[in-house]
Image (tube, helix red, strand yellow):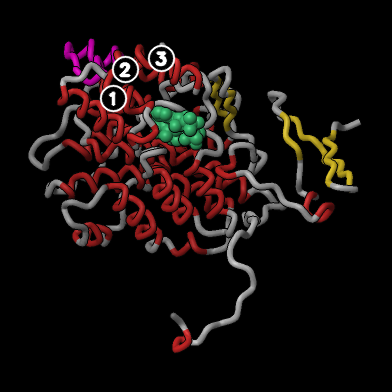
Amino acid sequence: MKASARLEIGDTICELPMIEGTEHERGIDISALRSTTGCITVDEGYANTGSCISRITFIDGEKGILRYRGIDIEELAEKSHFIETAYLIIYGHLPNQAELARFSELLTQNQCLHELMKYHFEGFPATAHPMAMLSSMINASSCFYPGLMGRRNAARFDVQAARLISQVRTIAAFSYRKSRGLPIIYPKRSYNYTTNFLHMMFSEPYEDYQPEPEAVRALDLIFLLHADHEQNCSTSTVRMVASSQANLFACAAAGVCALWGPLHGGANQAVIEMLEEIHRAGDDGSAFIAAAKDKTSGKRLMGFGHRVYKSYDPRARIIRRACDELLARRHVSDPLLDIAKRLEEAALHDPYFMEHKLYPNVDFYSGIIMRTLGMPVDMFPVIFAIGRTPGWIANVKEIMDDPKARIYRPRQIYMGPPKSPYVPLEQRQ
Ligand code: SDX
């Protein structure tokens, strides 16, 4: 007999079916709750609410497990690369040689923006944040592809997905160049995805940037580690928009906006700004940790804590090791990395952080790598968005492929004023 949950509300007893996932996580299916009891559930921030059944990513927050399509993130980080992992996340299996070659060719064919797009860049002030530019330009680019607006079509999906992954990277690089008053650098056909990004960011018309292998590897790892993360804030936003059958580019543009927040993908920028503040103050980190524990300070230890991980974020562990390797290969040290390590050591032994189960998350060390590669701080969330694009696409595809997909429309409990009459202007106080 299938397991069920009994819910007793007054004289009504409601049997709710249980769902068990691949890794034995359990959920209560409340799809019949309102019709059976007249009640809804309320779960501010959705901490206890599953929005969907998904087959893409599995996280065990207590054990610090992260798997893309069943493969451990540690194994992918060691053996795979971003584009192969993007294919895995979107299509559900590791690509064979032919599939990987076709996917790579689609990315190359779709790496350039429509030439008229460059005039859009002219309209942004030099101070424009690249995340604002990225979101706007993703939607602007969709205007050049009328096919995107048509009814969803699996055959066209592959091209649209490759175009989005490729162009997010091109738009990001162009945004950076424009914000610095630099000429845009076009992608090279001969370069792979990540090398091309570094080329478009740092080459000059008169001199090509020579991408060092360790820089390409470190950035590719950052993209791979950010590629998906189940129903986080931005991916949930993407699914919300996808549920209305908006086009793929509109979904991604919405995801960029949600990711930008400092509590989410903007945290990597906030971490570096925090470490720089500590460095400038000559603090050993203890004053900042004290402030982060003081609710009245308005400060948090950025890069620490997670809604799901109540243990060390496995991505943070991989990135921290990659930081050490990159700096060692370049024979450089970074005072901010030393401060970050001291902060981690202190926080992990502090009762407040231990009781709240606050550990370093993916954003705590990623900025150190991006800073070492010469990325400006305001580009950090953009790098996160480039990495996360395959995950967003995979989630949109899950909705597209589901014949029973419905528009996302949560309910609410109304706590506003009771019924009241309209008061004409002349009678108001
Ligand atoms: C990402 O969801 C994902 O999967 C996201 C992500 C992905 O790949 O998509 O992993 C990427 O967004 C990582 C998180 C990046 N954000 C930060 O590093 C910002 C700092 N961290 C937090 O603000 C916070 O931990 C969140 C936003 C990450 C999680 O927020 P929750 O789950 O809503 O937790 P909360 O804000 O309710 O905090 C619970 C308690 C509170 O204390 P009490 O009132 O219960 O006493 O923990 C405290 C908080 O004050 N707390 C912190 C803290 N994070 C939580 N206290 C100090 N410093 C912190 N960083």
Q: How many residues crowd mark 2 within 10 Å: few (<14), some (14–19), many (20+)?
A: some
Image x and y of residue 331, in percent? 17, 11
Label 2, secondary structure: give it.
helix
Residue type beneath disc 3: Asp
Residue 226 appears in view: no
First of labels 2, 3 by sequence position: 2
Query: Residue 217, percent across and down?
Result: 32, 22
Magenta segment range?
A: 322-341
- Residue visible at 14% across and 46% down in the picture: 180
Whether residue 245 is in magenta: the answer is no
What's the CA distance linking mark 2 and mark 3?
A: 10 Å
Which residue is found at the position 10% from the left and 35% from the top?
A: 207
Is ligand 1 less than 8 Å from the beta carbon at label 3? Answer: no
In the rendered image, which quarter is residue 92 located in?
top right
Q: Which residue is mark 3?
A: 350
288 left or right, relative to 411: left
Q: Residues within 10 Å of mark 1 (few under 14, many from 20)?
A: many
